Image (cartoon, rainbow, N blue to C red):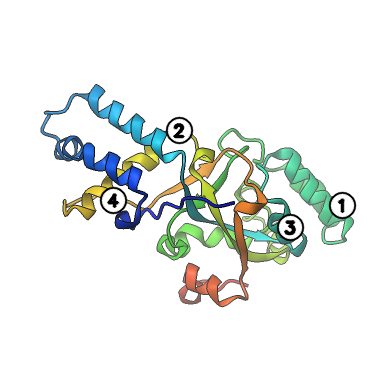
Amino acid sequence: MSRVLLALAQPAGWPHELREYLDVHCDLFVKWQAGTGEVRTATYDAAIYGLIDLLQAYAMVGWHCTRLTEDEIAHVQHGGMQLPDGAMLRRRVERLMQAGSLTKDIALQLLQTNQADDSNRAGMIWFCFFSPRLAGESGIGRFFRHWGGEALYNSHESDPQMSSVLQRIGVPCLVEAEVPIVSIGRHGGLAFKVVRSFLMNRGLPISERTEHEDRIRRPLEADCVRRVIRFSERDFSDLTGCTGWHSPLC
């Protein structure tokens, strides 16, 4: 499927309709950024909501940091990414137990103690829409060290035995995908970053960050997945900068 891609850091290459909308509202955004009080809140909000509507037609290249088995890599490549929850974790753990990668006792502990159904974790997949290496080891390192995702390893990484088990499963991976903005939802976070990038490109001094990370709340179709990059591949180290980390990945 052909998608119109939005590269957040490259305003000059943005779609014509988006650049035209920002040009029309440029003076409004400049005055709001300056905090002069010349722009009414309702007027600014209307411009942002209009921008949010416009962004729904585009997609962005993003990277999901994780640790996967070979079977899970194949599933992502051919079946896309489903939204995680307790039921998905149970299926993943049971597959590993059937394959002999987990004992029944360890599997039971993992299923009894996790955060997979917590409201701040279930039903969402996080992506960074900038080179992951910008987040550094402190930002992304943990995602690669333990299998099962943060909702699982958060509850077990401090236990030496359980931590060791989770570190032996799978390999560090980056899922590179063209993420439809419509799957992120209609909130202002991305729109604010678009405005900042636009104003910076116009020469305005902007101190706030423009790098964007966000979560999708819809399953990601297989044709959105560009590739799954394994730890052994050169692109993995180039994108993550992991060769310079204090604690090496394995």
Q: Nearer the viewer, mark 4 or mark 3?
A: 4
Q: Quickly name the residue at label 3.
A: 72
The answer to which of 223 and 233 lies nearer the viewer is 223
Three-letter code, disc 1: Lys
Q: Residues within 10 Å of mark 3 (few under 14, many from 20)?
A: some
Q: Residues within 10 Å of mark 4 (few under 14, many from 20)?
A: many
Can you give x and y, in whole percent of width and height, for residue 13 in the image? 34, 57
- Circles 4 and 3, Cβ within 8 Å, touching? The answer is no
Can you give x and y, in whole percent of width and height, for residue 237 in the image? 52, 73
Distance in Å between CA atoms under marks 2 and 1: 43 Å
Three-letter code, disc 2: Arg
Q: Which mark is residue 104?
A: 1
Q: Residues within 10 Å of mark 2 (few under 14, many from 20)?
A: some
**Quadrant in which the C terminus is drawn:** bottom right
Q: Is residue 86 left or right of residue 26?
A: right
Q: Which mark is residue 186?
A: 2
Can you give x and y, in whole percent of width and height, for residue 233 in the image? 60, 75
Depicted 100 relative to depicted 109: above or below = below
Q: Secondary structure at mark 3?
A: helix
Three-letter code, disc 3: Glu
Q: Which mark is residue 81?
A: none
Q: Is residue 15 left or right of residue 61?
A: left
Q: Secondary structure at mark 1?
A: helix
Mark 3 or mark 1: which comes first in sequence? 3
Depicted 1 relative to depicted 54: above or below = below
Mark 4 or mark 1: which comes first in sequence? 1
Q: Residue at x 16, y 54 (%)?
A: 203
Q: Quickly name the residue at label 4.
A: 197
Can you give x and y, in whole percent of width and height, for residue 30 in the image? 17, 40
Mark 2 or mark 3: which comes first in sequence? 3
